[in-house]
């Protein structure tokens, strides 16, 4: 098969990356997609760095064995610890996601910006370098959200558990002048409306959500176009969902992607 007709492979520790896939399907309906969720090992965000790297490599190997033309790391945590290694060791294009602090800090005004992400994402050199490049670090409030991806994996995006988790994380900063929240983990994309609602109440202000998945999908498209890998099919593409978590995880992923 010609390379441009091969699927694009997406990976995440679990269901979070489906938020990036959903945006990709919307923007590139003629492409074929394979999504691999490592649900058995989710969440990644509180595991040792070396283990996350090994798990991420295994996901990429799995996608490559399925015959993909590009790999998308739809996981901020895996990007933080593994993307450099992956780009050095694989020939196919590797696209990734990272917290959208650049657009968030370029928005007009001087209000503070909250970054919600996994403890791993916020404690690695890659994130420190990103902050350094962007500047205005004094406007960032970082909130490591241990356990939040796990709550999202349960599939109920409006649960009372989630509401009190988010409230408890944001409340200590209620005196700050906050204008936006960066969704620094793809799992949190599914609860962005809930985060926006709770944050807008706590900060008494219409909170803007900044989600890196839009920029990532624009980058996927750009790279496909520039490398002649974009499909020329006019038919709707196919979508295959794979998981290390078995049938139960696949059913949850289908529900999230096609019904919610
Ligand atoms: N969805 C992931 C991210 O963007 C990982 C969450 C986790 O597994 O802890 O960071």
Image (tube, rainbow, N blue to C red):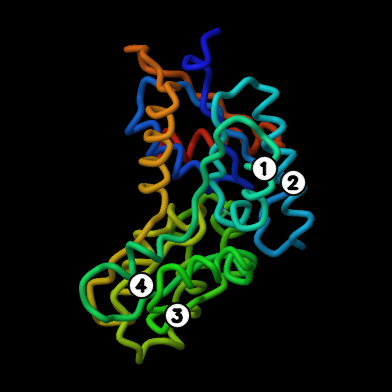
User: Residue 77: x and y, percent?
Assistant: 61, 57
Tell me residue 126's x, y (percent). 58, 63
Q: Which residue is mark 3?
A: 141
In the displayed structure, does residue 4 sit left or right of residue 107?
right
Question: Going from the N terminus, do you reach mark 3 or mark 1 first?
Answer: 1
Q: Is residue 198 left or right of residue 94?
A: left
Q: Which of the marked residues, 2 or 4, is nearer the chain's N terminus?
A: 2
Q: Gap in Å between the C-alphas at discs 4 and 3?
A: 16 Å
* Residue appearing at x 42%, y 21% in the figure: 228
**Which quarter of the image is occupied by the C terminus?**
top left
Q: Residue 225's spot in the image, x, y percent?
A: 38, 27
Residue that mark 1 sits on: 88
* Placement of 163 over or under 90, stated as above or below: below
What residue lies at 36% left-to-right and 47% top-to-bottom? 214
The residue nearer to you, when weighing 96 against 244, is 96
In primary-sequence order, the first of circles 3 and 2 is 2
Asked if residue 171 lies left or right of residue 68, the reply is left
């Amino acid at each position: 098969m010609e390379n441009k007709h091969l699927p694009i492979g997406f990976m995440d520790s679990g269901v979070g990356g489906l938020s990036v896939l959903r945006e990709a399907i919307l923007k590139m309906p003629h492409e074929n997609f394979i999504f691999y969720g490592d649900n058995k090992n989710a969440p990644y965000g509180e595991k040792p760095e070396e283990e996350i790297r090994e798990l991420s490599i295994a996901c990429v190997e799995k996608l490559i064995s399925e015959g993909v033309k590009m790999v998308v790391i739809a996981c901020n945590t895996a990007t933080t610890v593994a993307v450099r290694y992956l780009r050095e060791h694989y020939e196919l294009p590797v696209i990734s996601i990272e917290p959208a602090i650049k657009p968030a800090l370029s928005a007009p005004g001087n209000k503070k910006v909250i970054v919600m992400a996994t403890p791993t994402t916020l404690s690695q050199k890659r994130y420190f370098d990103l902050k350094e490049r962007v500047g205005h670090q004094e406007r960032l409030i970082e909130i490591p959200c241990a356990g939040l991806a796990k709550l999202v994996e349960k599939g109920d995006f409006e649960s009372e558990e989630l509401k009190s988790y988010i409230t408890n994380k944001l409340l200590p900063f209620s005196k700050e002048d906050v204008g936006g929240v960066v969704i620094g983990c793809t799992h949190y994309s599914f609860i962005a409306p809930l985060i926006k609602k709770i944050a807008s109440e706590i900060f008494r202000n219409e909170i803007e959500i900044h989600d890196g998945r839009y920029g990532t999908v624009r980058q996927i498209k750009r790279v496909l176009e520039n490398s002649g890998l974009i499909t020329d099919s006019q038919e709707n593409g196919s979508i295959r969902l794979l998981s290390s978590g078995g049938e139960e995880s696949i059913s949850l992923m289908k529900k999230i992607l096609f019904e919610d």
